[in-house]
Amino acid sequence: MTTDAPPPSAESANSSDPHPRPPGTRWRTTRRRLLIGAGAVVGTLLVGVPTAIEFGRPRLAEMLLENGISEPELPDSPLVWFELTDSAITFHVPKVEMGQGIHTALAVVAAEELVVPAERLTVRQADTTRGFALATQFTFGSTSVSSLYLPVRNAAALVRAMLAEEAARQLDVDPETLTPADGTFVTADGRTVDYLAVVAGHRGPWSEPAAPPPLRPSSSFASIGRPATRVDMRAKLLGEATYGYDARLPNMLYGAVALPPRFGAQLVQAEPGDAAGLPGVRQVVIDQEAGFAGVVADTRTRAWAGVEALRLTWEGGTSVSAADLDAMIVPGDGSEIRRVGSVSRAFTDATIITAEYATPLAAHAHLEPLAALVRVEPGSGGPIEAWVPTQSPETVVGDLRTVFGEDREVVVHVTQLGGSFGRKAGQHLAVEAARLSAAVGVPVHVGWTREQDLGHGFYRPPTRTRLSGALDADGRLRGIQQLSAGGDIIWAVAGLPEAVREVLGFDPGGLLGQFAPYQLDAYRVMNRREQLPVPCGPWRGLGLLPNTFALESFMDELAETAGVDPLQFRLRQLPRTPEGDRFRRVLERAAELARWSTSASAGTGRGIACTAEAGTVVAVVAEVQIVPDPAVETSDRADESGVRVTNVAVAVDCGLVVDPAGARLQAQGSVVMGLSSALYEELGVQDGRVTTVNFDSYPIIAMPATPPITVEFVGDGEVPHGMGEPVIGPVPAAVANAVRAAGGPRLRRLPLRIRG
Amino acid sequence: MRLTINGERRETEHPDELLLWVLRDELGLVGTRYGCGIGVCGCCTVLLDGDPVRSCTLTAAAVADREVTTLEGLAERDASGAVVALHPVQQALLDTPLQCGWCLPGHVLTAAALLAREPEPTADQIGEAADANLCRCGGYNTIKAAVARAARAGRDSDRSAGEADR
């Protein structure tokens, strides 16, 4: 089983058609609005799904037609399709692989309905020449498995049914008597025929079954729910996978682009300076009107050196510092986004406590810096072809068309992504590479340096949350007032007029993790968005980590004031609803996994926290040790902060678990990234520029500080929920709560530091 | 200038260029990764005469006459270049995979070098060896367990080879 983006190769470079299409280019829509490849070459079966996915919800073509999308707007080919030949079953998927394991998870779903071992599928990344524009390829928000779960199964079931009918014809038996098993059909008298032999023996057009093929019952699942073999791992282990930084074409050159010396600065004048005369420099490309200056050279480092030699004049921009940014985030007035009961009444004759929590500006710090390879065919109207590690291929198409013309032919091939965590949803390197390629007439690869990558990103915005809670005489929580403030997330990258944003008042990205799951007589949440002079945007889970840090730290402060065990305090505040029960289950199980009821040894403590996101409910227990001797010489950064995390237990209910191995990696990875945020990460900004531009000054967690992590899935049901983001939410609060439980101070600001 | 990469003689036109970029961009061996350029993240790790080094801090000229091993050269291959057997560390990570894989070459080569000099490493030794290899997807525990399994697998295969010899 293999997976890859169509790799740039000599073949594709020389092809006159930059849109390599599957053999059956024409598709016809079936009664059930699936697509069957028409005019396919003999011995090929193509079945596709014309699914459009917006905001994580799949909408089939039929629904779009009913909602005013006209017939010509239906795609002439799908983004999700199966291609069966006499030698392979290829599964083309729209979602991009950035390490989250989506190609494997979707292969498992498809394999289940096809009744083949998942290892027999070849998974390929679809490019942008097919399917609905919309957001189907956009890979975000922990929605890929949940949104494609049924569409992929429906298409795979159709494939299986069509194969069964054809197999029955070839074997001269009733299709009902055939049993699918491991990629073959078994007849009642024990004969077997392989799917691929059925395809090879087929002649003429394929016919659609008269009745909708039934989906297989979950009780018979053989692939879903079992740990899968990662489809892309062998290629990655042999160095054969192609990431964006790896993309290559014959005759390509390397480009580099001048980036502003401070956020918001505009390039007002650019001259080649000494760049043109440097060794290896082929061309200096300056477009003053576009504020663009770049260099193309025969090697990457020569291109970087060339940019250093340009004579550039920048104007404007900000001189802001990280402290200035913090001061701009002020909880208080804003938009009222939730109101239940009367806070003033709940706060009368009650014990009131108030605390304020803060999280800093933070970076994605994916290990593969941004990159793009683009070929612009010479001439003003030639097609543009791009190989890009992006979460949002349609955005790349749009960016290129904004610069090169709305009717310009553009194809984006998504490569493997070396991590992303939100950052590669919006990256403009394809435009940089395209400007340079258009100037020199050959393909150009632009790869950012680490310094550019950390210094010119968009970031998780700083937040500040002031919480007040009222406890009655029995230590029961009556109500909460929550004043939250943060930099823009969605609004920072979405193309909406400011007036619309003003009317809404809050940033939708900031709502993730915002609302307490507890039963409260009174609850009031005010949110205030701030447009910061430093670019901010989506970071794994958006507001989930900052908001959950504040809410779940505060729950522990309330429990401490009430004199109640933090686990019991939460359990008794949860509503008697199905959702409340899901919270109880993960809290109780995480506590059991961490031996919550046993006493912790001196200098150690356990903390618990929970949240819900993308349909998933999760609880995390962290165990920490307070490192006693501040004078000790150590290279361990955790010891410098005084906090060492010694164990983490996670109980998560994400509904149906499609690939337990992949889901476990997502949970463990979320814990590790959450610990890194909790203990180390804080972006430095001074004079309008980032000061922490490499891993020496922006440390992330390494192996020695990573504790054992136990993960258990406790959900069930027929539907899968998200696993990309939810688990990261409770991690910092669990650690902060554990520090307090270990006898340390109540830490209300990330990164958590007892000293230093 | 002539280099020895994965047992093969290769030519570079850029001896003053960093080994990282000669491997990746000139020779097309993209299994050596750029991550930081200052020797901190470990993505660019290659083996120089068997020892892990940072290819982002060495010029190609500095490794002339020495054996460079990259991820592409770790598996056992037949004369046609087809993979006969993965290195035990590769096999262990095939069984319990990582996520995005950008850091993977550095972790695999670092672990391969560790097992070559210390066939029975403790958990702490595995952690110390990998201290300077970052993994943003958070696969540290997976790597640690995989390296320990690879060590056991290596010992088992040595033992069975020894028995076969007798």
Image (spheres, coloured by chain):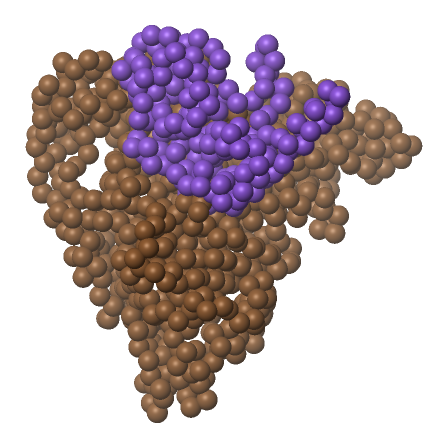
Chain colours: A brown, B purple
Is A741 on the left-hand or right-hand side of A582? left
**Residue A413 pos. (x, y %):** 43, 28
Residue at coordinates 45% horizontally, 39% vertically from top-left?
B130
Q: Is residue A706 above or below residue A695?
A: below
- Residue sitting nearer the eye, A585 or A638: A638
Residue at coordinates 53% horizontally, 58% vertically from top-left?
A650
Quarter of the image where the N terminus of chain A is located? top right
Name the quadrant containing residue A718: bottom right
Residue at coordinates 64% horizontally, 32% vertically from top-left?
B155
Q: Is residue A260 above or below residue A499?
A: above
**Residue A20 pos. (x, y %):** 49, 20
Residue at the extreme front of the image, as rendered? B166
- Residue sitting nearer the eye, A749 or A342: A749
Q: Is residue A316 above or below residue A550?
A: above
Is A236 on the left-hand or right-hand side of A37? left
Quarter of the image where the C terminus of chain A is located? bottom left
Do we see residue A172 in this rendering?
yes
- Residue sitting nearer the eye, B54 or B66: B66
**Residue A310 pos. (x, y %):** 12, 24
Is B161 on the left-hand or right-hand side of A381? right
- Residue sitting nearer the eye, A478 or A527: A478
Residue at coordinates 35% horizontally, 33% vertically from top-left?
B35
